[in-house]
Amino acid sequence: MSAPLPQKTRHLLKLYEDDLAFRYERKTGAAYLGRAQSFLDWLGARGVELSAVRTEDVHAYQSALYARRKKSGRPYSAGDQKNRVKAIKSFFRFLYRRGCLLHDPAAPLDYPRVERRLPRTILTPDEVRRILKAVDLKTPTGLRDRAIIETFYGTGIRSGELARLTPDEVDTEECVLRVVQGKGRRDRNVPLTRAAAEAIEAYLVSGRGKLVRGSRQRFPNRFATTAAPSPRARGPVPSRDPPSATTTLRGIAVRASSRASRQRGKLAAASSAGITTERDFAPAAFIVMSV
């Protein structure tokens, strides 16, 4: 168990936490803070105060990161090591710019080389068409799912960015999507394909009003489809975090699989009864994603 940090170090860590909250998203800031905390614990275990840290100490910590092993005995990935080094450099850069340190001991630190690999799973055009055809456009949920898939496929935005979209941030006439406070808390304009714009427009006109009331979310989740609570209801309304867009897409794949199974059952029944049909019983479309 690590020793408690000195009061001054805790104060500096709190200032760093406030700076992270201003510059990054909540999860990103928490990751940076946790890695800085781990480094301070490592220093405390060796009796090194923050004000006395030298470049040799930071290099020793980086060597300790290389030597770390998982329970299985395998080393941690170069990406994990890079993220920890990045957090340390960010922490000391913050302290140096605030005038808390006379020099930045982590400035000479180099990032470990991270191997860049191509994606293992890439959908073919035929697989994409099968996914799109698997969505039932006769239901509001199907219209929503089609809009989500078309937006993902046509823009390449992140799932968190899509989940935060509001009706004011998509222009279906000009085919432009506005990402507000995206990665790095930066705003950017993303071009929309005509297919994505039409799918969003169809969802807004025919589907969204039946799924959500009084919400500004463009793609309401399954928890937002329930009716609004009665004004007479007492007590706080329990809040639930909406599922990610990845969860929604996986739900689409499950529904597509169920639908294809029913189609195959109908085909088998028709064949056993001697009935011929030219209907295309398309196989289920499975989405393979890693987030």
Image (cartoon, helix red, strand yellow):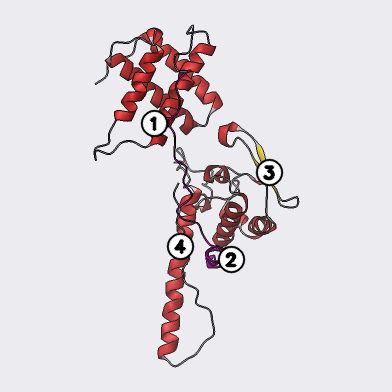
Q: Position of residue 7 (x, y in %)?
A: 37, 9
Quick check: marks 3 and 4 in contact, CB under 8 Å?
A: no
Q: Earlier in the sequence, mark 1 or mark 2?
A: 1
Q: Secondary structure at mark 3?
A: helix
- For the point 41% across and 83% down, which residue is it? 268
What segment is highlighted magenta in the picture? 108-137
- Label 4 vs label 2: CA separation? 18 Å
Look at label 3 and name its amino acid: Asp
Look at label 2 and name its amino acid: Leu
Look at label 4 and name its amino acid: Phe
- The residue tagged 2 is 137
Q: Nearer the viewer, residue 145 or 72?
A: 72
Quick check: marks 4 and 1 in contact, CB under 8 Å?
A: no
- The residue tagged 4 is 286
Q: Nearer the viewer, mark 4 or mark 2?
A: 4
Quick check: marks 1 and 3 in contact, CB under 8 Å?
A: no
Q: Position of residue 256 (x, y in %)?
A: 47, 66
